[in-house]
Each structure stands twice: as structure tokens, then as C-alpha cells.
Amino acid sequence: MLPEEIKKFIEEFEKLPSIGPRQATRLAFRLIGGGQAKLAEMANAVSGLKKVKICPRCFFVHSQKTDVCSICAESTRANDVFMVIEKETDLMSIERTKKYRGKYLVLGELTKSGVLEPWQKLRLNALKKIITDEMSDKMAKEIIIALNPTTYGDLNASLIEKELKNYSHKMSRLGRGIPTGGEIEFADEETLSHSLTRRE
């Protein structure tokens, strides 16, 4: 009943977070209803994402001419303090507080099974390599594990701490300014600031 082009659109977009087949179908019809000019504008926006790169140090997205992102390249940041976060949006929320001046590691979406994916282990290994290659005593000053305070977030945090505890003088977690079950991405700046200040 539906043209193959729409079926293909639905098939691809329903794979995205929070978008199922029904929402993808609505999106397709909304875009088509906007006319050819709106479709071309949207196509250009999606095509532009091909220019976005992943930083090989922290795995955040960027479009700098260099390989590394602007955060990793910033000389005024502490090079021996690292924050492990789950999503890019968590990094953006932390940055808005202007309370953290170290570096990051974006681990990627965690599973609820409490098992790190092979590609996440590779990211942790990349951080270990940075620490052993660039720190004078092969140890970071501090590694902050900033995962959502949920059951599976706590479980994954324990796994990450085991992986990294021999690479840092201090391991800490965000303070519980964020309620249990909450998400870093949606916390306001004041709550996040308190969580950073009261990390344990």
C-alpha cells in the first residue's frame, strides 16, 4: 500500500531512540506534506551529518579541521582528570554548568544487562593508553564516573571502576544531587553543579 520509498524511510527511522514504526510513519507524512523545498532542506541537514567526526580521544562529536575535538584540544583544561559519561547529551549538560574543567570519555549507550559492549571496552582501553602514555606516573589524578543514578547505571559504574581503578589515584562518582532513577541529560544546571561539588 505504501510506496517503497516511504517503507524504506520508516524502516530506517524506527531504529532511532524513542521512534517506533508509528512515529516514523508520521514523520514521513509530515515531511512529504511540507513540500519539495522542505524535503530538500531536511535532506541537506541529514547529509551534513556526514561531515561530523568522532574524536579519537574522548569519542565526542565534532567538526574541527583537526582530528581531536575542541575540548580535548583546549590547553586550559586539566589533562589528568577524566570524566566517564554515557551519552554526548550528558557531556553537553555537564559543560553547561561551567564547573568541570577536565577531559571526558563518552562511553556510549549502556545496556541494562550490566555488560560492557566490546566497542565500549575499546574506548576504555583508549583512555588507559592516554593515561599510561601521557601521565608522568602513568596514573590519572582523578577519574569521575558520571553515570545516571539508576540500578543499571550503578551496575555499569562498578564494572567501569574495576576496569580503571589501577589507572587513577582517585576514583569518584557524582554526588546524589540527581535523584535515584533520574538522568544527567535532563538535570538542571544547579543540580548538576551540586552533584559535581559533592562527588564522592
Image: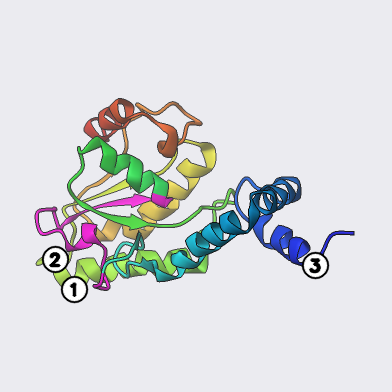
Asked if the residue at tag 2 contacts the one at tag 3, i.e. Cβ–Cβ closer than 8 Å, the answer is no
Q: Position of residue 125 (x, y in %)?
A: 35, 69
Mark 3 or mark 2: whose residue is earlier in sequence: 3
Where's residue 92, x and y in %? 34, 45
Instruction: Work out whether residue 100 or residue 145 is closer to the camera in this orientation and state it.
Output: 100
Q: Please tell me which residue is depicted at 20% across the width and 38% down the height of the picture.
A: 98
Q: Position of residue 187 (x, y in %)?
A: 39, 31
- Residue 75 in the magenta stretch? The answer is yes
Q: Which residues are magenta?
A: 65-88
Task: Give the residue type at disc 1.
Answer: Asp
Q: Residues within 10 Å of mark 1 (few under 14, many from 20)?
A: few
Q: Residue at x 15, y 58 (%)?
A: 74
Above or below, 54 against 190 in this view is below
Q: Which residue is mark 3?
A: 4
Q: Nearer the viewer, residue 58 or 68?
A: 68
Q: Residue at x 65, y 52 (%)?
A: 31
Measured Cα–Cα span from mark 2 to mark 1: 6 Å
Residue type at mark 3 is Glu
Q: Is residue 138 above or below residue 115?
A: below
Helix, strand or loop status at disc 2: loop
Q: Residues within 10 Å of mark 3 (few under 14, many from 20)?
A: few
- SS category of the residue bearing label 1: helix
Q: What residue do we see at 31% from left, 62% from top? A: 58
The label on residue 135 is 2
Q: Mark 1 highlights which residue?
A: 133
Per the rendering, the mark at residue 159 is: none
Q: Is residue 46 magenta?
A: no
Residue 192: name its quadrant.
Answer: top left
Labels 2 and 1 touching (C-beta < 8 A): yes
